[in-house]
Amino acid sequence: MNIAMLGSGFIARFYADALAGQRRRDKLTMVYSRSADRAQIFANDYNVTHHTDNLEEAVNHPDVDVVVIALSNELHLPAVEACAKAGKHVLCTKPLGRSGEEAKRMLQLVEEAGVMGGYLEDLCYTPKFLKSLQTVQSGGLGRILWAKSREAHPGPHSDWFWDKNKSGGGAIVDLGCHCIEIARNFIGKNIKPVEVMCWAATQVHPIDAEDNAIGMVKYANGAIGQFEVSWCFRGGMDLRDEVMGTEGTIWVNNFLRTGFDVFSTGKGGYVAEKAETNKGWLFPVGDEVHELGYNHMFTEMFDCIENGSQPQETFYDGYVVNAIIDAAYKSAKSGIWEPVQLDDWRGDTDTTDKAEAASYDDQYYLIKEEVLPNGEKKIILKDKKTGEVVRRDI
């Protein structure tokens, strides 16, 4: 499959490394950049046949089958409009839009054009995430009660991220989009997000947007998704997920401390994304492209285009994430729980809280059972009729 890359910066190069690596059969044939010089440099670096500073030319080139958007946030909508008009499948980096309204328009465009809209949410394709999701979906953790995701680092690499008008916000829209979708997958995409409580602040940087935030997303079944994001964390990039269910728990450290530690006096070069130093004890990542999910993500996206099926992450998912982010920003201002406004909900309509007590026998609910240090076993029970809580030795 022949690919046009829209963008020539940081994320475009990560994508290109995945697309061009390990004898990939899909080929980069076109690159667009607003800078003709940068387009040419990118084309030379990745052996791309065509390069241009004209977006329409890139999208409409006859050699292009699918378009990858790796542009700043304010350019996503016009790029999707061009792809839909040209009838080209389009894969867009996160977040899909700067708002739920923008994301919904992009979703409408690809569906009306009959092309696939793939949402490039790479952290939902990391090897650890995919294994964790398989465990959850197989019932290994029981009913999911709480899913937490954290992303924190010293701040973005490009100037436009720090401009609220171009990006749509700060750390929430930049990093929270990852965390929200990770939790959504674990809780279940068919479960409706209903309301959000969020704290956000600008604690360090001279910007109009937030550089720190914590939020909770309540789902219709009673589950909670939690996100922690920061552009002020010192020491590299911290990517961690936790999932708690009635039958088990998952803890995942994706990036900062993965069992690969190196000490250096500082004579080396690049260590890892967002690493702040190349001196002292360092925490490199063996294969960033793979560990960050790019390989699995693009493999699935292109397989789905060929098979006429939908990928794990679609433009609809991007729309839901943007709607949750909208509610988070409202909550950060109001200080109260704010409803998630979803004009187009395609999941379950049942809004019943699924919390239910485990039955021990006809008379009692089971609260807890455990083994004490002396080997004694006990259970804590609650009488179904009287509500009395009792202890029993077993």
Image: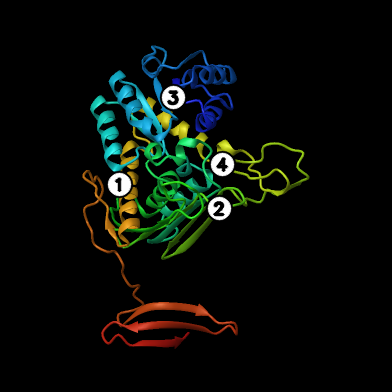
C-alpha distance separating marks 3 and 2: 30 Å
Give the secondary structure at mark 1: helix
Work out whether mark 4 precedes mark 3 in sequence or the reverse, and give the earlier one: 3
Q: Nearer the viewer, mark 4 or mark 3?
A: 3
C-alpha distance separating marks 4 and 2: 21 Å
Q: Nearer the viewer, mark 1 or mark 4?
A: 1
Horizontal and vertical percent for residue 294? Answer: 51, 35
Res. 258 in view: yes
The colouring scheme, among rainbow, by chain, secondary structure or one colour, is: rainbow
* Residue 6 numbered tag: 3
In the picture, which quadrant includes the N terminus?
top left
Image quadrant in which you'd find residue 108: top left
Work out whether mark 3 precedes mark 2 in sequence or the reverse, and give the earlier one: 3
Give the secondary structure at mark 3: strand
Q: Are marks 2 and 1 in contact (CB under 8 Å)?
A: no
Work out whether mark 4 precedes mark 2 in sequence or the reverse, and give the earlier one: 2
**Kind of residue at disc 1:** Ala
Q: Which residue is mark 4?
A: 291
Q: Which residue is mark 2?
A: 233
- Give me the residue at 37% from left, 30% from top: 75
Vertically, is 375 above or below 295?
below
**Kind of residue at disc 3:** Leu
C-alpha distance separating marks 4 and 3: 23 Å
Work out whether mark 1 precedes mark 4 in sequence or the reverse, and give the earlier one: 4
Horizontal and vertical percent for residue 131? Answer: 50, 48
* Residue 323 numbered tag: 1
Q: Are marks 4 and 3 in contact (CB under 8 Å)?
A: no
Q: Nearer the viewer, mark 4 or mark 2?
A: 2
